[in-house]
Amino acid sequence: MSITEPMPGETLPPATGPGAEPTNVLLPGHDVPLGRYTTVRRLLPQRQLRTVGAWCFVDHFGPDDVANRPGMGIGPHPHTGLQTVTWLVHGEVRHLDSLGNDQLIRPGQLNVMTSGFGIAHSEYSPPEHPPVLHGLQLWVALPEAARSGPPGFAHHADLPVLREQGFSVTVLVGEVGGLRSPAVVHTPLLGAQLWLPDGGPARMPLTAGFEHGLLVMSGAAEVGGVALTPGSLLHLGSGRADLAVEAAGPTRLMLLGGEPFDEALVMWWNFVGRSHEEIAEARADWAAGAPRFGRVHDDDSDPLPAPPMPGTRLKSRDRHGRTVG
Ligand code: MN
């Protein structure tokens, strides 16, 4: 998964200015083709909302019928300045990286790859794979203190699950109801799957100092009078004590949150940085095969070439999409 096109925010509606209060702003995502067979729903970044907490990129893929197709096939590519968080509802994906990790991920498990200053990885459906592929690829922007650090990778086969009457909450990142995910992140952050197998109401506590966004992976829900279906992100703002959801039938949601991320970012292709120059340097390093990114072990596929740099300078944007500097 990567940003393989000009910044999508340029084509989104004008800012509605979600502020530091509870809101119910429905932000439609947009479809992005990935390879020959897959179209993903990109829900972040958006023109007027670049981040939710430090979450800076949200792609929802599937459910896709991959029974007689290759499925996911993303060759070696670099990252810098971020963590990738992979979550599956259906299917299997094999992760390979330049640290030598070779990890199959299955539904209910979590992969967290930390790029630090630089890493390269690839992601493939195994040759023999389940017929359906459905999941999320998320990025977390690393704060200044962690973004130049060493790369790393962690696979979490078991995540804490809070079981309530009529629904469950799987804690991917952060903490819910006293249950804490083992995933290591570098800013106060939350990622939680809400599963309502029979629909109905669900209520869960929120951290009031966090901002939150909510998406539906399957099914349909209503939050604060707003109907939510797959393909949109509901920005909830901050200052909420809890979240109340009403689902019409079996529904799976992902709640993302965190302390509002105050560092302005430049996001381009697979890189998160702070300036045009940094991005240009990362691109040149990848093109040159620099040791910064290393080589993906056990992967003979051609590395993905970076697209050409745009003709204009990449701009640094704050979390509301305003250019900075
Ligand atoms: Mn990637």
Image (tube, rainbow, N blue to C red):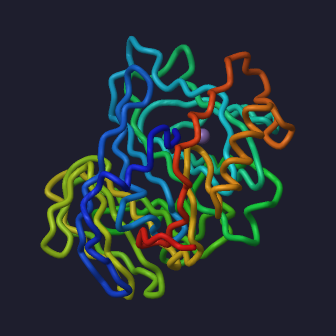
Q: Nearer the viewer, residue 110 or 145?
A: 145
Side of 185 relative to 161 (left or right): right
- Whether residue 241 can be seen here: no
What residue is at 70 percent from the left and 31 percent from the top? 96
Classify 165 as above or below 310. Answer: below
> Which residue sits at x=69%, y=41%?
283
Total marks in image: 0
| 72 is higher (above) or lower (below) than 163 | above
Q: From the viewer's perspective, tell me whether residue 60 is left or right of residue 220.
A: right
Kindly identify the residue that appears in the image at 50 percent across and 60 percent down: 56
Q: Quadrant of residue 290?
A: top right
Decide if residue 176 is in sight here. yes
> Going by the picture, which residue comes out furthest to the right?
291
Query: Taking the image as four quarters, which one is ligand 1 found in?
Result: top right
Asked whether 151 or 263 is in front, the reply is 263
Residue drawn at x 53%, y 79% as measured from the top left: 259
- Residue 76 in percent (x, y) is at 67, 29
Q: Position of residue 111 (x, y in %)?
A: 62, 46
* The quarter of the displayed image where residue 169 is located: bottom left
- Against 22, is 165 above or below? above
The relative height of residue 302 versus residue 261 in the rendered view (above or below) is above
Give percent across and percent down for residue 306.
61, 34
Residue 256: x and y in percent read: 44, 65
Most extreme residue toward the top, as rendered? 68
Quadrant, the C terminus: bottom right
